[in-house]
Amino acid sequence: MKAAWGVAYRVACGVCLVWLAVVLGVAVHYGWRALVADTFVIPSDSMSPTLLPGDKVRVDKTVFGARLYTSLDFTDGRMESIRTRGRRGLRYNDIVVFNYPVNDKGRIGFKMNYVYVKRVAALPGDTISFVHSRPVNSHYEGVLGLAEAQQRLEETPDSLIPWYAMRNILVETAVLGYTIKDIPPVYVPRRGDILRMDDWRKAEIYRRAIEWETGRALAWDGARGQCLSDGRPLPYYRFRKNYYFVCGDMAYGSKDSRYWGFVPEEYIVGVVDRVVESHHPVTGRERRERRGLNLTNNE
């Protein structure tokens, strides 16, 4: 009888150890993905030739800090989170993964697992413009993105560029009168900075950010020449959040901040540091030459 109990005890201990190992394995797996690094597969050619469709990239979350949800209520695009302390802030030309910031209602709103990958062209507090298709940053003198791709865009006749791709700039409509090749200086909001709301273009460009921060409708009163927030005059606005301006390396075919505006800091997932593996999206052929490709930004 004692022998039978001993066998049963050992079996029970073995089962418990197996379950403990499974639980610890799951915890380590998801803990690693949440706090350290995760992988994403590139679906389009907007970052070509740096990243190709079918590339699986590693996203380092320790660089900028891991984002941890404090609520799982994502109703109406709501997202509440905190961020762990990162090793550094974002830099110019960092390749970042982020949640696409515009929801189905045309406002800033969170979409779970709907992510983009682009290159950082401007940080909070910068002013960015596009001159002859090239990004010009007020605080950075180096090359942003791929100059060759930008030159190809500049040399492409306007008549060959779809009208919406040519003129639906910053706010996804042609109301501003800008083109993809030449965008006047645009200030990228930084937490605590105050912007004078004295022009209808500012109301258009910053509408999404201000409405997202305040929950109030923003409008421009053309008759009185003033900005209104829920019908009340808004001569100045102090931003509560940080934002980024991001662009794809394929200057011609990338849907990015040139079209829909700024990325809130809270929407940044992490920084791409390498290609883990790569398969052709149609044939499935493994592209071994891309495995381990280092994309770390050492600027």
Image: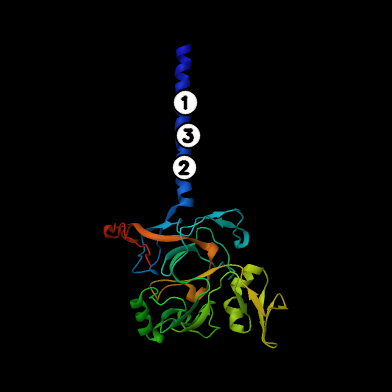
Reply above or below: 201 against 287: below
For label 2, the residue is: 26
Question: Which residue type does callout 2 highlight?
Answer: Val
The earlier-in-sequence mark between 1 and 3 is 1
For label 1, the residue is: 13
x, y percentage for residue 158? 41, 86
Residue, x 54% and y 54% (percent of image)? 68
Single out the residue that lies furthest toward the left.
289
Report helix, strand or loop for mark 2: helix
Discs 2, 1 touching: Cβ within 8 Å:
no
x, y percentage for residue 164? 48, 80
Which quadrant would residue 40 be assigned to in this image?
bottom left
Report helix, strand or loop for mark 3: helix
The earlier-in-sequence mark between 2 and 1 is 1
* Crowd rating for badge 1 (residues with CA inside 10 Å; few <14, some 14–19, many 20+): few
> How far apart are labels 2 and 1 at the CA level?
20 Å
Q: Nearer the viewer, residue 132 or 19?
A: 132
Question: Which residue type does callout 1 highlight?
Answer: Cys
Q: Nearer the viewer, residue 228 or 40?
A: 228
For label 3, the residue is: 20
Q: Nearer the viewer, residue 189 or 96?
A: 189
x, y percentage for residue 94? 42, 66
